[in-house]
Amino acid sequence: MRIAITCDNYSPHLTTKRCQRVGTWAAANNVEIAYTPTNSSWLNRIEAQFTALRYFALDGTGHPSHKARGSMIRRYIIWRNKHAADERLRRVVARANVA
């Protein structure tokens, strides 16, 4: 089975152009690394999950520290994993998944 890994244009993701080790490994392991075009992060399906994270856990909050923000993110992930079928969550993700 072929596995596809989608990467945006964040500079560490461009290693196949700079370092052949990643490309060689991918070819040997039946992996395709696909890069989204510049300014097209919306093509990467995981981005919709970050939209939901911002919507449900971060928007309108003023965390006093990084530790408090990390705790809020961890609590959201636990909630999200337990409520994957939640209609509000599905609407936010569907709205962000325009591709």
Image: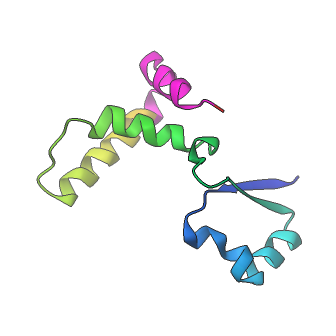
18 vs 71, left or right, is right
On the picture, is 81 further left or further right than 97?
left
The structure's colour scheme is rainbow
Q: Main secondary structure of the magenta part?
A: helix
Q: Which residues are magenta?
A: 81-98
Q: Is residue 46 above or below residue 92?
A: below
Residue at point 26%, 45% (across, down): 72
Q: Is residue 67 above or below residue 74?
A: below
Number of disc labels: 0
Left/right of residue 57 with respect to residue 37 in the rendered view: left
In the image, residue 72 above or below residue 60: below
Residue at x-position 72% and y-position 83%: 19
| Residue 13, picture quadrant | bottom right
Residue 88 placement (x, y as % from top left)? 42, 19
Residue at x-position 62% and y-position 55%: 38
Residue 37 location in percent, x, y? Answer: 67, 53
Q: Identify the residue at the far top of this view.
A: 87
Residue 50 image offset from top left, x and y in percent: 45, 43
**Quadrant location of the C terminus?**
top right
Q: Position of residue 70 (x, y in %)?
A: 28, 54
Residue 50 is a magenta residue:
no
